[in-house]
Amino acid sequence: MNIEVVTEKTLPRLRLPQVSRPGWFGRLWMLAVLPALLLFTIPILTIFLRLSLSDFIHSLRQEAVLQAVHLSLITSFISLLGIILFGTPAAYYLYRRRSRLHWLADTLVDLPTVLPPAVAGVALLLAFGREGLFGPLLRSWGISLPFTTAAVVLAQMFIAAPFYIRSASVGFAAVDCELKHAAALDGASRWQIFRYIVLPMSAPAVLSGCILAWSRALGEFGATLIFAGNLAGRTRTMPLAIYIGFETNLEVALTLSAILILVSSFALLMLKVVIKNHLPAN
């Protein structure tokens, strides 16, 4: 019996696929992407080129800037707490999809994201203003919402809540149904299933929704301007202070714009880190 000895000479040479260089179509495609990147980069970069470090530090010491930053941070975090409190049940309801009115609730949740901010402000004013739908009832309780800090929070919640609800709902839907069925067979209640299984396993999506909602609330402008006004130290958030700054002090407007860009960039970076750390490994 002849046994052929396998050596390197008898083995067929394996040719690894070579990475081809991009052809004319690939180069053309890269050139086609460049205008979009420049459109996003140049305007933002111009703000930092126009604003010197000394002007930035000087503007940070001004009372108008400090008031706007402080008010924006306080109201956006309060809005986020309210969004989590009222938005989590809504996200869970959308995830279950057992009601005939699910399509209506799903549409209403997404509606603020496509409405012009001015329309949202008018709607809030007609609903909760002094002469609005609930105005007489609120007055009987001694509550006046328009042109107050509470109006800023309500406007931010109205605009930013859909971002949290949608993200949390997607996270709830991604939880394995077999785990919930197994927990139910073991005697777990719906609340226990949600608390110990659904919520922990959907934590990345919920956290992503929190980051998106907070960033959107921080940059809210149109609805706040109409419903809450532009009162210094009371309703003038950073976007509203930027609007006033272009008429009175351009350095203040540029400083607040730079702050919002840096904060938004950091929020997006944190969002990408959360998503990347919870992606399934290939």
Image: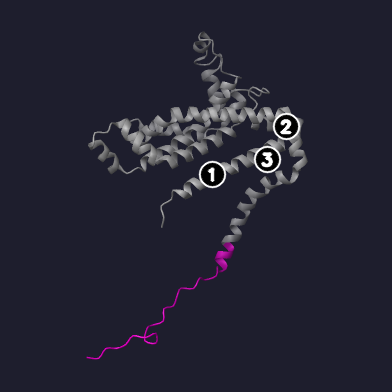
Where residue 237 sits: x, y (%)? Answer: 64, 29
Q: How many marks?
A: 3
Q: Which residue is mark 3?
A: 258
Is 23 within the magenta?
yes
Name which residue type carries label 3. Answer: Ala
Q: Is residue 236 above or below residue 18?
A: above
Q: Say how the picture is coloured.
A: one colour
Is 130 within the magenta?
no
- Which dot, 3 or 2, sits closer to the camera? 3
Where residue 267 sits: x, y (%)? Answer: 56, 41
Q: Callout 1 environment at 10 Å: few (<14), some (14 to 19), or many (20+)? A: some
Name which residue type carries label 2. Answer: Gly
Q: Give the numbered dot on residue 245.
A: 2
Q: Which residue is mark 1?
A: 270
Give the Cα separation between the discs numbered 3 and 2. 13 Å
Q: Quadrant of residue 72?
A: top right
Q: Earlier in the sequence, mark 1 or mark 2?
A: 2
Give the Cα separation between the discs numbered 1 and 3. 18 Å
The residue depicted at 59 percent of the width and 41 percent of the height is 264
Name which residue type carries label 1. Answer: Met
Q: Main secondary structure of the magenta part?
A: loop
- Which quadrant of the figure contains the C terminus? bottom left
Q: Earlier in the sequence, mark 1 or mark 3?
A: 3
Where residue 44 sits: x, y (%)? Answer: 67, 45
Q: Earlier in the sequence, mark 3 or mark 2?
A: 2
Q: Callout 2 environment at 10 Å: few (<14), some (14 to 19), or many (20+)? A: some
